[in-house]
Image: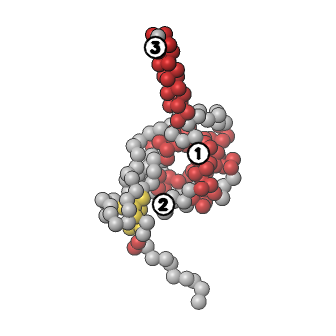
Amino acid sequence: MKPLRALGLVALGASLLLTAIAADRPPTPAAATKAEIARGRYLVVYGTCNDCHTPGWRETDGKIPDSRWLTGTAVGFRGTWGTSYPTNVRLDFAAMSEERWLLAVRTRAGHPPMDWEDLRALSIADRRAIYAFVRSLGPAGVPAPDALPPWRDPAPPYIDMRAVAPAPSATP
């Protein structure tokens, strides 16, 4: 093979590799407006996302700076499904396109106690606003622990959802 032809094939291969790598990254979202980001912030607070996904939120009555919001926690939720951990939403969204987020809301069941059905009740505009707000925070923190199957005992701390009995019915 001639040296120039070989060099051309190497350049073509490198170009294809870089294209494949770039295609694997989420596209840069369109610039969100201040109003969309503010709406997303409101929905995150009202939807109680921080209750599980922000360490110390409940203990401080929500007095956690935005810079620490939605970074996940190592406090597990143990139930009949196993043990799940509130994910670091900021790292997830940094690696996820808006289209993938919208698909996840439509199709994902996830582990309890996450209420995906509540997210599905939101309008597309509200779901996009949540995405815009979380993306505006930028990546921070570390990934949450991986979920555990039901037969594995989690290390503390965790909340044992198996011990939570339903409230008695108020009707006779």
Query: Which residue appears at 49% of the width and 27% of the height?
Result: 17
Element class at badge 2: loop
Instruction: Determine if residue 7 is in view.
Output: no
Residue 129 picture location, percent across and down? 64, 45
Mark drawn on residue 100:
1
Residue identifier under label 2 = 111
Q: Earlier in the sequence, mark 1 or mark 2?
A: 1
Q: Earlier in the sequence, mark 1 or mark 3?
A: 3
Element class at badge 1: helix
User: How many other residues sit within 10 Å of disc 2, few (<14), some (14-19) or many (≥20)?
Assistant: some
Three-letter code for the amino acid on which mark 2 is drawn: His
Q: Is residue 164 above or below residue 64?
A: below
Question: Total of numbered circles in the picture?
Answer: 3
Residue 55 picture location, percent across and down? 42, 51
Q: Nearer the viewer, residue 115 or 4?
A: 4
Residue 122 picture location, percent across and down? 66, 55
User: How many other residues sit within 10 Å of disc 3, few (<14), some (14-19) or many (≥20)?
Assistant: few
Q: Earlier in the sequence, mark 2 or mark 3?
A: 3
Spatial CA distance of label 1 from label 3 is 44 Å
Q: Is residue 47 above or below residue 125?
A: below
Q: Nearer the viewer, residue 68 or 138?
A: 138
Mark drawn on residue 1:
3
Spatial CA distance of label 2 from label 3 is 56 Å
